[in-house]
Amino acid sequence: MALIWLYSESIWLALLPLALYPTVHLLSYTGTKVIPAFAPTADLPTPAPVANSSAPLGGCPNVQSSFSESIVTFVIRNYDNLMDVICKLEIMLWAMVLSVRCC
Protein backbone atom coordinates (compact mmCIF):
# COMPACT_ATOMS: atom_id res chain seq x y z
CA MET A 1 0.00 0.00 0.00
CA ALA A 2 2.87 2.34 0.72
CA LEU A 3 4.13 2.04 -2.86
CA ILE A 4 0.69 2.82 -4.25
CA TRP A 5 0.47 5.97 -2.16
CA LEU A 6 4.03 6.92 -2.97
CA TYR A 7 3.08 7.35 -6.62
CA SER A 8 -0.30 9.02 -6.07
CA GLU A 9 -1.24 12.55 -5.12
CA SER A 10 -2.90 11.71 -1.78
CA ILE A 11 0.23 10.67 0.09
CA TRP A 12 -0.61 12.76 3.17
CA LEU A 13 -3.71 10.66 3.87
CA ALA A 14 -1.61 7.52 4.16
CA LEU A 15 0.52 9.17 6.80
CA LEU A 16 -2.36 9.52 9.28
CA PRO A 17 -2.50 5.85 10.38
CA LEU A 18 1.28 5.64 10.17
CA ALA A 19 1.54 8.59 12.55
CA LEU A 20 -1.17 7.56 15.02
CA TYR A 21 -0.11 3.95 15.52
CA PRO A 22 3.50 4.65 16.59
CA THR A 23 2.35 7.60 18.70
CA VAL A 24 0.15 5.30 20.79
CA HIS A 25 3.00 2.86 21.32
CA LEU A 26 5.50 5.64 22.01
CA LEU A 27 3.23 7.01 24.74
CA SER A 28 2.81 3.55 26.22
CA TYR A 29 6.55 2.89 26.24
CA THR A 30 7.31 6.34 27.64
CA GLY A 31 4.81 5.92 30.46
CA THR A 32 5.92 2.43 31.47
CA LYS A 33 9.68 2.40 30.83
CA VAL A 34 11.29 5.78 30.12
CA ILE A 35 9.76 8.02 32.80
CA PRO A 36 10.19 5.46 35.61
CA ALA A 37 13.83 4.98 34.56
CA PHE A 38 14.71 8.69 34.59
CA ALA A 39 12.38 9.83 37.35
CA PRO A 40 12.52 7.12 39.96
CA THR A 41 10.06 7.21 42.80
CA ALA A 42 10.93 8.36 46.28
CA ASP A 43 13.52 6.21 48.02
CA LEU A 44 11.51 3.75 50.00
CA PRO A 45 13.27 1.47 52.41
CA THR A 46 13.49 -1.99 50.94
CA PRO A 47 11.84 -4.45 53.27
CA ALA A 48 13.41 -7.80 53.95
CA PRO A 49 12.09 -10.59 51.73
CA VAL A 50 9.06 -12.22 53.22
CA ALA A 51 8.75 -15.97 53.02
CA ASN A 52 5.89 -17.19 50.82
CA SER A 53 5.30 -13.71 49.45
CA SER A 54 3.86 -13.50 45.96
CA ALA A 55 4.60 -9.77 45.63
CA PRO A 56 7.63 -8.75 43.56
CA LEU A 57 10.77 -7.59 45.36
CA GLY A 58 9.71 -8.90 48.72
CA GLY A 59 6.50 -6.91 48.96
CA CYS A 60 7.68 -3.54 47.62
CA PRO A 61 4.80 -1.79 45.88
CA ASN A 62 5.34 -0.70 42.28
CA VAL A 63 4.95 3.06 42.69
CA GLN A 64 5.10 5.27 39.61
CA SER A 65 5.17 9.02 39.22
CA SER A 66 1.86 10.77 38.69
CA PHE A 67 2.88 11.90 35.19
CA SER A 68 3.75 8.35 34.21
CA GLU A 69 0.49 7.09 35.67
CA SER A 70 -1.50 9.68 33.75
CA ILE A 71 0.14 8.68 30.46
CA VAL A 72 -0.48 4.98 31.07
CA THR A 73 -4.08 5.68 32.12
CA PHE A 74 -4.67 7.76 28.98
CA VAL A 75 -3.31 4.99 26.74
CA ILE A 76 -5.31 2.27 28.50
CA ARG A 77 -8.51 4.30 28.39
CA ASN A 78 -8.19 5.35 24.73
CA TYR A 79 -6.32 2.42 23.13
CA ASP A 80 -9.40 0.72 21.69
CA ASN A 81 -10.80 3.98 20.33
CA LEU A 82 -7.49 4.93 18.73
CA MET A 83 -7.09 1.51 17.12
CA ASP A 84 -10.66 1.77 15.83
CA VAL A 85 -9.86 5.15 14.23
CA ILE A 86 -6.66 3.75 12.71
CA CYS A 87 -8.50 0.74 11.26
CA LYS A 88 -11.22 2.93 9.78
CA LEU A 89 -8.60 5.20 8.22
CA GLU A 90 -6.85 2.23 6.64
CA ILE A 91 -10.13 0.84 5.27
CA MET A 92 -10.99 4.29 3.90
CA LEU A 93 -7.57 4.47 2.24
CA TRP A 94 -8.01 1.05 0.64
CA ALA A 95 -11.46 2.07 -0.61
CA MET A 96 -9.94 5.19 -2.14
CA VAL A 97 -7.15 3.19 -3.78
CA LEU A 98 -9.55 0.62 -5.20
CA SER A 99 -11.98 3.27 -6.43
CA VAL A 100 -9.24 5.24 -8.15
CA ARG A 101 -7.60 2.16 -9.70
CA CYS A 102 -10.83 0.42 -10.76
CA CYS A 103 -12.66 3.36 -12.35
Image (cartoon, rainbow, N blue to C red):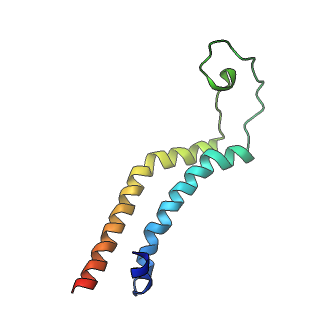
Furthest residue in direction top, as rendered: 51
Where 65 falls versus 55 (above or below)? below
Residue 68 percent coordinates (x, y): 62, 45
Where 23 falls versus 72 (above or below)? below
Residue 24 or residue 97, whichever sits in front: 97
Q: Would residue 54 be found to the left or right of residue 6 on screen?
A: right
Residue 40 or residue 6, whichever sits in front: 6
Where 29 falls versus 60 (above or below)? below
Residue 99 percent coordinates (x, y): 24, 81
Q: Would residue 81 be found to the left or right of residue 41 on screen?
A: left
Residue 66 or residue 64, whichever sits in front: 64
Residue at 45 percent across and 46 percent down: it is: 77
The image quarter in which residue 70 lies: top right
Residue at 36 percent across and 57 percent down: it is: 84
Furthest residue in direction left, as rendered: 103
Figure disc tally:
0
Quadrant of image for the C terminus: bottom left
Residue at 44 percent across and 70 percent down: it is: 16
Where 70 falls versus 92 (above or below)? above
Residue 82 or residue 6, whichever sits in front: 6
Residue 57 percent coordinates (x, y): 68, 25
Residue at 29 percent across and 78 percent down: it is: 96
Quadrant of image for the N terminus: bottom left
Residue 2 percent coordinates (x, y): 43, 76
